[in-house]
Image: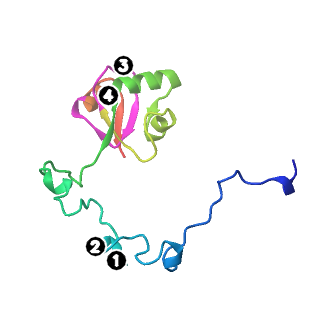
């Protein structure tokens, strides 16, 4: 096989149909757009959700719910998870960077520490938010908290 012997598969290359080039082409006159109506006119673009004049689905369905655009979403981490992470890595301080390195959170996530599980080690914990019970549990174990 050489470059001068290579050809595309039969039927794979076809010329683009040129419409609106006279009656003799078979695609002249209305240029395959049919007669009258919005779709036959230049400048027509179908609107998203348009159903041919029928009441669109998004208007037929009832509206419900509310999304608070001021909501702050935290990734919940339990004190039990902090205990196991600190024991496994031999850490005295567990912060955002340590949690990110361990794969608990991704780059831009905010962290809230919750009180599920038990903590026995004195750990310095650094996070964006703490539940009251988690804060008490960490301080009762001899640890400290720092809000970032």
Range covered by the magenta-colored residues:
114-133
Mark 4 falls on what kind of element?
helix
Residue neighbourhood size for the residue with mark 1, other residues' Cα within 10 Å, grouped as few (<14), some (14–19), many (≥20): few
The image quadrant that residue 144 belongs to is top left
Q: Is residue 61 above or below residue 23?
A: above
- The foreground one among 95 and 34 is 34
Q: CA distance from mark 2 to mark 1?
A: 7 Å
Q: Is residue 122 above or below residue 29?
A: above
Q: CA distance from mark 3 to mark 4?
A: 8 Å
In primary-sequence order, the first of circles 3 and 2 is 2
Can you identify the residue that label 1 sits on? 41
Q: Are marks 2 and 1 in contact (CB under 8 Å)?
A: yes
Can you identify the residue that label 2 sits on? 37
Please report the residue visible at 36 percent of the width from the left and 19 percent of the height from the top: 120
In primary-sequence order, the first of circles 1 and 3 is 1
Can you identify the residue that label 4 sits on? 138
Instruction: Where is residue 37? Give x, y as percent.
Output: 28, 73
Please report the residue visible at 37 percent of the width from the left and 46 percent of the height from the top: 148
Q: Is residue 122 visible?
A: no
- The foreground one among 143 and 51 is 51
Instruction: Where is residue 22? Give x, y as percent.
Output: 50, 80
Can you identify the residue that label 3 sits on? 120
Residue at the far front: name it.
24
3 or 2: mark nearer the eye: 2
Residue at the far bottom: name it.
22
Q: CA distance from mark 1 to mark 4?
A: 71 Å
Q: Which mark is residue 21?
A: none
């Amino acid at each position: 096989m050489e470059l001068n012997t290579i050809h595309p598969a039969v039927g794979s290359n076809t010329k683009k149909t040129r419409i609106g080039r006279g009656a003799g082409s078979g695609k002249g006159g209305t240029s395959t757009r049919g007669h009258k109506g919005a779709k036959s006119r230049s400048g027509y673009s179908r609107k998203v959700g348009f159903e041919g004049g029928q009441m669109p689905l998004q208007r037929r369905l009832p509206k419900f719910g509310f999304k608070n655009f001021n909501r702050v979403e935290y990734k919940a981490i339990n004190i039990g998870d902090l205990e196991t992470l600190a024991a496994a890595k031999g850490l005295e301080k567990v912060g955002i960077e340590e949690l990110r390195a361990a794969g608990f959170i991704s780059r831009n996530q905010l962290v809230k520490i919750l009180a599920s599980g038990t903590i026995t080690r004195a750990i310095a914990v650094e996070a964006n938010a703490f539940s009251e019970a988690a804060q008490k549990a960490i301080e009762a174990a001899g640890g400290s908290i720092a809000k970032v």
